Image (cartoon, rainbow, N blue to C red):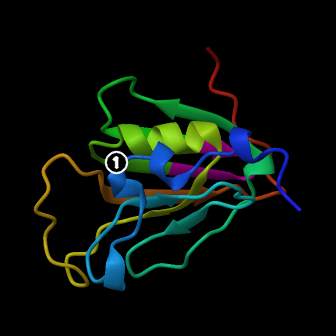
Amino acid sequence: MSDPLANFRRRTADFPPSSTPPDGGDGYIAFAAKDRVERLKIKRANKPTHAPGYGYLLDIIYDGNHGTNFVLVYTVLGVKVSGKNLQPVIMALLAGTADFIQEYDRNQWPKPTDAQAPLIESIEVVVQDAAQPAAHTGT
């Protein structure tokens, strides 16, 4: 039986080369994208991994075309990401196809040689206490 929606699904070729993990998995990769993703795995260096569902993602705040930082706002979680060349990561998050984002750990991987590839230098996760209401900062 053929897939009637096959023409409308994203293919791996639709994403930049940096979104596909390298063969062997020896090098650093900032993110990977898939066709169907329910949760975003947030992999931090030497810290626990979080995997919130895309259904709880309220907002993505980013610095336009600069690609140096973005913030993911979940119902009870905030994630601040800083780095370089993050535009492909942001586009995958906006499309809901990012499978994971990963902080670079110099103790685990050699320094990336591709100056154009996305590089996540830091990931900060702030978990809001469910008992405390969120502070209103005003706009």
The amino acid type, in three-letter code, at marker 1 is: Ser
Q: Which residue is mark 1?
A: 82
**Label 1: how many residues lie within 10 Å, few (<14), some (14-19) or many (20+)?**
some
Q: Nearer the viewer, residue 52 or 116?
A: 116
Point 69% across, 29% down: residue: 136
In this picture, residue 49 sits left or right of residue 110: right
- Taking the image as shown, residue 105 lies to the left or right of residue 91, namely left
Magenta stretch in the rendered image: 72-79
Identity of the residue drawn at 44% across and 71% down: 44
Q: Is residue 133 magenta?
A: no
Q: Is residue 75 magenta?
A: yes
Up the image or down, 84 lies above or below 106; here it is above
In this rendering, does residue 2 appear at all?
yes
Q: Quadrant of the N terminus?
A: bottom right
Quarter of the picture containing the C terminus is: top right
Give the residue furthest to the top. Answer: 139
Residue 51 x, y percent position in the rendering: 66, 67
Q: Seen in the image, is 40 located left or right of residue 24?
A: right
